[in-house]
Amino acid sequence: MKPDLFEAPDYYQLDDLFSEEHKLVRDAARSWVKRDISPIIEEYAQKAEFPTQIINGLAEIGAFGPYIPAEYGGAGLDQISYGLIMQEIERGDSGVRSTASVQSSLVMYPIYAYGTEEQRKKYLPRLASGELMGCFGLTEPDHGSNPGGMVTNFKDKGDHFLLNGAKLWISNAPFADIAIVWAKDEGGRIHGLVVERGMEGFSTPETHNKWSLRASATGELIFDNVKVPKENLLPGKNGLGAPLGCLDSARYGIAWGAIGAAMDCYDTALRYARERIQFDKPIAATQLQQKKLAEMITEITKAQLLAFRLGQLKNEGRATTAQISMAKRNNVDMAIRIAREARQVLGGMGITGEYPIMRHMMNLESVITYEGTHDIHLLITGADITGINAFK
């Protein structure tokens, strides 16, 4: 395994805008990725296995619920710190960032925002420490971009709820201890339920044969007459807006995370172009390669500025769903295009596991689709600027 020589590009000196705490948090995550992710990630991606031994490390760098208050086990950090942690983790691998995103934004956030005080105290500290791992069940086999059409449902049986249905494409499902499951009540209203591993009728079969996110564990959630205690209902918010509020937080993290993947591809391509000699000179001396590299750093810089401003708005409680959608769509699209260009800079070497680019490229094919597809986010922006909903 070659040493991780990554150097983060900062063409517009964004470090001047970050607080000392921001930089300390980011640098701790960056060091951890270099030490604990880079040496193993290619092996785990090749064998399509999630490295469970990294869970404690993710907890130690504050990747689980970094913005959750300290009284519930979180680090009490701001939203820019959360974004920077996601950026550094995805620089290592999108699948590892997915694990942290799900735990933070899709499991801890709804418990904190919509749960009771008893639920917060019961689950959040153990989730923050990595003692418990969670997953988020919204997408179904026949309902992806239209989650409101879900058929998973629960019925009131007096002393418990009876849950039936299935969820698909669920990150962390194969090893999760709890699942935040979104299901319709008898009146068709969507609610969140905390379903725990071990409940009779609840199973989590793993999804195999993925070309993308190979170092991430993906699975299904199957509910066959699962008895869920009534105290496991999240009472703070219901309706489709409840799970979509969680997705806002997760999409925000992705907008930062994708920058990390792009930076890794750019840094790899730049280093290779300086070292690779063809026609008696480094390929970095040629106009076409300089064009590729110049466009990469320009797009990364634009994405960094977009994410930073969005982080400021998140900190102020002013970031809108449409603004988050724009950043997620733009930054992931940027990253996947940079991965493709970087692969060309490396020529044939770009497809090998000796370099991270092909792994990033395959991972980003999932990131551009999950938590709102590329096209859906475009329509969210379109609806916001025109006032006309094109979904229906």
Image: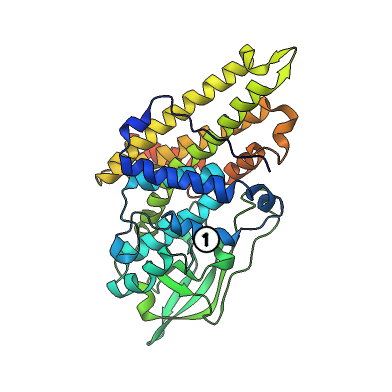
Residue situated furthest bottom in the rendering: 159
The location of residue 325, given as percent across then percent down, is: 41, 42
Q: Which residue is mark 1?
A: 55
Q: Nearer the viewer, residue 125 or 328?
A: 125
x and y, in percent, of residue 150 in the image: 48, 63
Question: 48 left or right of 125?
Answer: right
Q: Is residue 384 left or right of residue 293?
A: left
Q: Quadrant of the N terminus?
A: top right
Residue at image location 36% in from the left, 54% down from the top: 245
Under circle 1, the secondary element is helix
Q: Judge whether residue 369 can be spotted in this image.
A: no
> Amino acid under label 1?
Ile
Front residue of this view, candidates 276 and 211: 276
Q: Is residue 368 above or below residue 67?
A: above
Percent x, y of residue 346: 68, 28
Residue depicted at x 57% and y 67%:
175
Q: Nearer the viewer, residue 103 or 373?
A: 103
Q: Position of residue 170 (x, y in %)?
A: 55, 60
Residue at the spot 50% in from the left edge and 25% down from the top edge: 297
> Can I make out residue 153 in this image?
yes
Q: Residue at x 61, y 27 (%)?
A: 271
Relative vertical location of residue 292 with respect to residue 150 in this rendering, above or below: above
User: Residue 60 lies in what quarter of the image?
Assistant: bottom left
